[in-house]
Every structure is written in structure tokens, then in C-alpha cells.
Amino acid sequence: MSEDDKVYVPNSQWTPVNPPSVIATGATTTPTKPVVTAATPSIDSLPDGFDPFEHLQQVYIPQHNAIVKLYFKDLPTDWKPNIATARSSLCVACTMLDSDNQLMMNLRHHLLFDLLGYGRSGLSIFYGSKENYDPPVVGHPKIVFYFSQDIASVPVGGTVYDAECSVRLMKLQNTSENLLATLKEIAGEIKTKFVHEASGIIHAKGNLCISYHDTINGFPKGSKILANSETSATNIYQLICDCIDIVFDETKITVHDPKKLSTVGIPTATQIIMGKTRKLRAYRPVVNVRFRYAYAIIPGNPSPTFLIDTTHRYKPLVKI
């Protein structure tokens, strides 16, 4: 390159100058960048012709499909939409498309978050009664039996009452090799004794407090069942003992009969708590509660192991 081919520029660097065009054709050889002026909407208003649903789709679909991709990350990286396998079929069904209407978007969301359970993954899901909670004894699994009212029996504006009772498996440790097999056997017994024709047995809850104290066999001091009659609670204790294969001893039953009567109907009395009006809690109302499920709390295991479930919400060891 000769000195004539260079041009002096202010930054003291020599820069080659290309010819502006091809002589033979006249076509411009110097690349140019088109100036694009985007129609930026005003900060305090929406653009003309704004379509809320179209905008929602543009924002929502990429976010949803990113979650779908993460949920189905076990599929090959070069996977193409198909319905040849169960996983592929589910992935296709969950993936949202630009052509989806609102109904399709709702169904795909429901399938992924509710039916497949993505919405519950990683969350602390509440299970069991809101009234009672005891941490399990170190090493010994605890089995909890949960009851609740039938929705049809709850008056309008009323509270759904529930109940639970538990027993610890004192002959087993959380590290026992036969733990899973034993839990399956117990689940089978619970199915036989607590479930009739796919529905749980009914327990009459009331103001009597029936306790059963047998620490050696898993009923520590403080084990109690609220009942409308001694017979109803005693029957529950008897069934639990049968399920875990221990002998029920009626002499270990204690009945506490308070003078205070059960609340009848929906409580109307109120009190002011931190400036807000709250209804007074009903005192041991007389209601029928039905057995719903049983689960095991195993020390060291972060999630409960469901044994039986008549609500079909969980994945039990033994199905109804």
C-alpha cells in the first residue's frame, strides 16, 4: 500500500479508504446502518390500539414455557414435539402457543401447576389438624390419623372442624430396614379398619376429653381425643392399636368430663384484637368428623409419608 492510499485522520492513525462503489456496476460497497426510530409509547399512557389480552400472552407465554422446559428437562436436548411417550405427550399439552385462547391457556396452566403438582413443588404444604401438633420423638416414626367434617354438614358461614390423633411406632426407628414394609402393612390395616366402601369411618367429636396413656406402646402422656361419648373415642383407640399390632388396655383410658357445655351453632360473640373484630372460638362443638387420611412423620425425612388417603390429594402407599 502506497502513501497515496492512506489519509491522515485527527487521531494520528492511518486508515485505509475503500472505494465508495464498484465502477462496473455502480453498487455501493460501503455498508450503511439504517436509522430506525421506534414508536415508543408515552410513559403515562398505553399505545393506540393496545390489546390487553395480546399483551398478556406476549408476557405470560414465554414465562410459562420456560417453566415447562425446566419441568421436562429430562427430555433430550434435541427433543421435538411429539406424543409418542407419556412425558412427551404431557410436555406438548403443557406448552402454550401464540394461537391459544384463554380457555386453552387456563387448561395448560391447570395441568402443569395443579394436576402435575408444579405449583406445590418446593412449598411447605400444610397437612393435618390446625389444632394439634407435636414433634415426633427422636428416631421413632409417628402415625397421624386425620378427620374432618363433610362439607355438606357445615352451615353457611360456619367453620369446617377437624380432629386428629396419633401413635408412635416404638418398635421401629427411622433407620429400620423394614420400615417401608411395615408402613405398607399398617396402611393395609388402616384401609381395612378405617375405610368402608371408599369412605372413612365417622367419629363423633364433642366436649369429652378421652386420653389413653401407654408410653411403651406409643401413646405418651397427653394423647387425647375429643369425643361426644367415651365409646366413640375408645373405639378409635382400639382400632389404632389393632392397626399397629399392639394390645389395647381399657384400664389406661381416662375420661375428662368438663362442666362447660359445648358451643351450639355458629358462635356470634366477638372480641377486639389489635383493633379488629374477631369471632370467639367455639368450645368443643358436637360434630361428626370423617376419617380422611393417615400419614407417617419420620424423623430426618422432610416430607410426610402418606399411608392411606380417601381425598385422593396425596400419593399413599396403599390406594383405596
Image (cartoon, grey):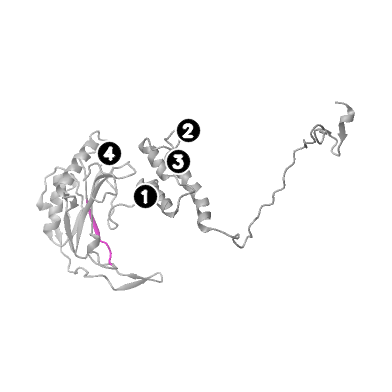
* Residue at horizontal 24 percent and vertical 64 percent from the top: 154
Residue beneath label 2, please? 78
Mark 1 Cα shell of 10 Å, populated few (<14), some (14-19), many (≥20) = few
- Asked whether disc 3 touches disc 1, contact meaning CB atoms under 8 Å apart, the reply is no
* Image quadrant where residue 257 sits: bottom left
Farthest-out residue, front: 25
Q: How many marks?
A: 4
Q: Earlier in the sequence, mark 4 or mark 3?
A: 3
Q: Amino acid at mark 4?
A: Asn
Q: Amino acid at mark 1?
A: Asp
Q: Give the x, y percent position of residue 281.
A: 28, 67
Instruction: Give the number of the disc on residue 70.
Output: 3
Taking the spot 21% from the left edge, 50% from the top edge, the residue there is 220
Residue 67 in picture, x, y percent from top left: 45, 44
Instruction: Report how far apart the C-alphas of labels 3 and 1 lie in the structure.
Output: 16 Å
Q: Would you say 156 lies left or right of 73 here?
A: left
Could you say which quadrant of the image residue 206 lies in? bottom left
Q: Is residue 310 magenta?
A: no
Region rendered in magenta: 158-165
What's the CA distance linking mark 2 and mark 1?
27 Å
Mark 2 or 4, nearer chain start:
2
What's the distance in space between the residues labelled 4 and 3, CA to CA?
33 Å
Secondary element type, mark 2 = loop
Q: Nearer the viewer, mark 3 or mark 2?
A: 2
Task: Identify the residue position indicated by label 4 in the image.
Answer: 174
